[in-house]
Image (spheres, helix red, strand yellow):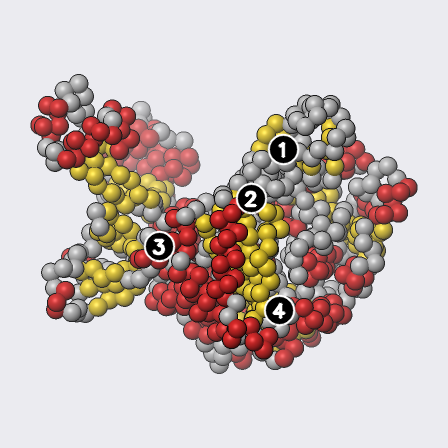
């Protein structure tokens, strides 16, 4: 028996399966998708089994090397995911092992170590008499230990003499969790006699044995739990084990990512007329196994989540499984709470806020069939569920569903592939669908379902646009207009809650010298450093460079330094000055780095222990708090002027989403948006909650400029520490792609070459080409040629990335 294995080297030369013999003792254990250790040249590498071959060409007999060992005894990638990996490798112009690795939980990504294997111990010690082998060293010596004692030349002499040899080892990081448990080792009647025979001095043994006999039906129990309940020491436990009364054992357990979360049981709610219509439209596709795609365009608060829950309930009744994707980690606690509150058991959670070990255990629960519903962020789309009956993508417009580095997949594309494979419906939902999705709904590629009313029949909150150009002329404090300040004060007086959004973290966007105009720049990137007051540091949000704040200008030595711009830190400080009685919770990347902080901050606000929730875009979506009656946007222009054809769309979506956090309960809500561009078409359409008007307006702009959904796009980016090399390579690529047959009849448009929006990041210079084309086949061959030379380019210090349908241009 032979296996085809993709080895763990992301390189063009080995971007294909290699054949290995399966040793006889592994033939009944090995499976598709398992990780194995294989010899590759002089090294041992991790590989993933993608196919079995019953026989091979007789001419190769005796030349095929065997698999060294199995790293797993269960497969983490089923046959469906292996098949998907082939298609993704072809579509995304990437390496097969890169795709397979992206599908695995982090704990299954191996590390490698180099050791020196001792071949001749006597010769080794005779040459190194001053360094005898310690008792810990048997047959191998860690590389670091040997290199600390010997020079490279001495090591080479030992290698040449055959005294030592280099060995490369695969380090498997996968670790299961075990707890110690207690079980009775004798029949109950025997132990009752032993209990009666204990003398008065053995009261601890008496307490422990009495407890175990009382809870005999619940055994085995965790020893930690028993010791806490009886206040008995471990020495007593060991004594009783030595007497043969009880047995101690190690029991494997799953790590529970929801252990600290209080879950509230919920019941299915009666559906409104619009909800019921959407539910009934999707239900036949589940029951008849139709891989249709539905787009729910529902205003904020229209009850989309209840539709998801009732559809998933039907899927479970049919014995099938479901995936629910959410875009932000901040949304996950609330969504997980609703799903687990409805289904209690059988829900797995997968998102970046979990520890590596928790993700590993959740993955194993899915594989073992202990979870039938998966809730999580982008990578959850690879959950190895069998018999999928429904896939849901909440807030489908969000850019976080697109992976920003290799492999640059979009969860929506993967979801479509898996839905087709399982003959299951795919449900997309948003208050502000992406222009591409809404266009597909318009022409019938997706079935469009509309929810125009909130479930509580409350109207959408009125939105007021405040012109900050006028405020800046009249006021010295320009973070808050008098209108927003008065509205916050009014809510605080009524003991209602406020949500404030500013999509920029830090204290100030930069530090400026008032003497010479110098702005503190990152030395590695062409961008200013952001001031973080709490740490008294200047930080680059692109390369993570940071430094202390200088006391004088590095350009002119002036002491006249001042901050300009504003971030969430500064706004939090201003809020405390303006409203000293208010409690403020700040949510941004700086306050939510630690595990579980998202949930803790939201729980604090949800319990009413804070009056104001201040944050970046992570607070704009999905959050549902009944007492929030005011939403304020400090500066609505942060995403409006970025060099991206989707800038208007992203701004409209963000403002609409955050506006939807107001007035979701019994109290009416209000939204105040501060902007320096009050007459911009996006602001006017947001004010009227006019998504339809925005969609048709945006479609006209896209048609005039040949952008999606009328054209596909691909972004080719070249970066290098040598600006000249990067520039030459991007021009070569344009020459290579600008073929007359592709440029004819408007089939292909090439924009650029141009410098990146930020020309230098982390000492690398960026140049890019944007391709716009009607048919994917028109550019596939040319882009494949570019991809084929990626390895060769990398050797020259030039790195090329290919991003199809890019969502980020910086």
The answer to whether one can see residue 594 in this image is: yes
Pick whichever, 524 or 308, lies toward us: 524
Earlier in the chain: of badge 1 and badge 4, it is 1
Pick whichever, 74 or 256, lies toward us: 74
Which residue was labeled with disc 4?
Answer: 708
The dot on residue 11 is 3
Marks 2 and 1, how far apart in space?
A: 16 Å
Earlier in the chain: of badge 3 and badge 2, it is 3
Earlier in the chain: of badge 3 and badge 1, it is 3
Marks 1 and 4, how far apart in space?
A: 38 Å
Pick whichever, 543 or 555, lies toward us: 555
The dot on residue 538 is 1
In the rendered image, which quarter contains the N terminus?
bottom left
- Dot 3: what SS? loop
Marks 3 and 4, how far apart in space?
A: 32 Å
The structure residue drawn at horizontal position 74% and vertical position 40%, both measured from the top left corner, is 565
Closer to viewer: mark 3 or mark 1: 3
Marks 3 and 2, how far apart in space?
A: 25 Å
The dot on residue 761 is 2
Q: Mark 1 packing: few (<14 Cα in 10 Å), some, or many (20+)?
A: many
Earlier in the chain: of badge 3 and badge 4, it is 3
Earlier in the chain: of badge 2 and badge 1, it is 1
The residue furthest top is 130
């Amino acid at each position: 028996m032979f296996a085809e294995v993709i080895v763990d080297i992301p390189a063009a030369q080995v971007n294909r399966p290699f054949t290995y013999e399966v040793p006889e003792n592994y033939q009944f254990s090995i499976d598709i998708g398992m990780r194995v250790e294989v010899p590759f040249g002089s090294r041992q590498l991790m590989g993933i089994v993608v196919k079995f071959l019953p026989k091979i060409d007789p001419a190769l007999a005796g030349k095929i090397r065997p698999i060294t060992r199995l790293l797993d005894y269960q497969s983490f990638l089923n046959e469906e995911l292996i098949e998907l990996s082939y298609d993704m490798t072809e579509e995304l112009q990437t390496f097969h092992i890169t795709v397979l690795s992206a599908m695995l939980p982090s704990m299954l990504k191996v590390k490698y170590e180099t050791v020196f294997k001792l071949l001749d111990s006597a010769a080794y010690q005779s040459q190194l008499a001053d360094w005898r082998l310690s008792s810990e060293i048997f047959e191998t010596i860690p590389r670091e230990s040997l290199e600390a004692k010997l020079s490279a030349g001495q090591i080479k002499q030992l290698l040449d003499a055959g005294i030592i040899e280099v060995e490369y080892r695969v380090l498997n990081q996968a670790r299961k969790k075990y707890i110690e448990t207690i079980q009775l080792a004798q029949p109950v009647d025997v132990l009752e006699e032993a209990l009666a025979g204990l003398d008065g001095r053995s009261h601890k043994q008496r307490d422990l044995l009495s407890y175990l006999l009382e809870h005999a039906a619940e055994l085995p129990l965790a020893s930690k739990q028993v010791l806490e309940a009886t206040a008995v020491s471990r020495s007593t436990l060991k004594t009783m084990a030595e007497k043969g009364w009880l047995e101690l054992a190690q029991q494997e357990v799953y790590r529970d990512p929801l252990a600290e979360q209080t879950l509230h049981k919920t019941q299915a709610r009666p559906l409104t007329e619009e909800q019921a219509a959407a539910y009934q439209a999707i239900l036949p596709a589940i029951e008849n196994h139709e891989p249709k795609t539905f787009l729910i365009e529902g205003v904020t608060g229209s009850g989309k989540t209840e539709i998801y829950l009732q559809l998933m309930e039907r899927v479970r009744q049919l014995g099938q499984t479901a995936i629910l994707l959410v875009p932000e980690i901040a949304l996950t606690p609330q969504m997980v709470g609703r799903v687990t509150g409805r289904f209690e058991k059988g829900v797995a959670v997968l998102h970046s806020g979990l520890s590596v070990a928790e993700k590993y255990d959740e993955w194993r629960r899915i594989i073992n069939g202990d979870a039938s519903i998966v809730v999580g962020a982008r990578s959850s789309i690879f959950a190895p569920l069998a018999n999928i009956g429904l896939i849901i993508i909440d807030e489908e417009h969000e850019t976080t569903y697109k992976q920003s580095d290799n492999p640059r997949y979009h969860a929506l594309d993967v979801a479509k592939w898996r839905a087709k494979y399982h003959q299951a419906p795919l449900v997309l939902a948003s208050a502000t669908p992406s222009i591409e999705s809404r266009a597909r709904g318009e022409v019938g590629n997706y079935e469009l379902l509309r929810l125009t009313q909130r479930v509580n029949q409350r109207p959408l909150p009125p939105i007021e646009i405040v012109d900050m150009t006028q405020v800046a002329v009249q006021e010295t404090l320009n973070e808050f207009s008098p209108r927003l300040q008065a509205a916050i004060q009014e809510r605080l007086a009524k003991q209602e809650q406020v949500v404030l959004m500013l999509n920029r973290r830090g204290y100030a966007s930069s530090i400026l010298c008032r003497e010479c105009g110098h702005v503190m720049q990152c030395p590695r990137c062409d961008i200013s450093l952001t001031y973080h007051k709490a740490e008294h540091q200047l930080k680059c949000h692109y390369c993570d460079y940071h430094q202390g704040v200088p006391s004088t200008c590095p350009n002119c030595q002036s002491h006249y330094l001042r901050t300009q711009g504003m971030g969430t830190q500064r706004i939090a400080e201003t809020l405390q000055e303006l409203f000293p009685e208010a409690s403020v919770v700040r949510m941004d990347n700086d306050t939510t780095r630690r595990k579980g902080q998202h949930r803790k901050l939201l729980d604090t606000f949800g319990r009413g222990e804070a009056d104001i929730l201040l944050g970046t875009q992570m607070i704009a979506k999905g959050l549902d708090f009944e007492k929030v009656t005011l939403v304020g946007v400090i500066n609505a222009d942060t995403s409006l002027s970025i060099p991206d054809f989707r800038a208007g769309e992203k701004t409209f979506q963000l403002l609409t989403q955050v506006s939807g956090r107001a007035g979701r309960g019994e109290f009416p809500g209000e939204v105040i948006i501060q902007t320096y561009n009050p007459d911009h078409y996006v602001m006017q359409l947001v004010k009227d909650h006019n998504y339809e008007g925005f969609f048709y307006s945006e479609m006209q702009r896209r048609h005039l400029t040949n952008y999606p959904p009328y054209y596909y796009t691909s972004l080719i980016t070249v970066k290098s520490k040598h600006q000249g090399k990067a520039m030459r390579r991007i021009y070569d690529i344009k020459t290579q792609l600008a073929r007359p047959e592709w440029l004819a009849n408007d089939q292909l448009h090439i924009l650029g070459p141009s410098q990146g929006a930020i020309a230098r990041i982390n000492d690398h210079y960026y140049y890019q080409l944007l391709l716009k084309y009607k048919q994917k086949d028109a550019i596939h061959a040319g882009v494949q040629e570019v991809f084929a030379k990626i390895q060769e380019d990398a050797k020259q210090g030039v790195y090329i990335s290919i991003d199809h349908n890019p969502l980020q241009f910086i």
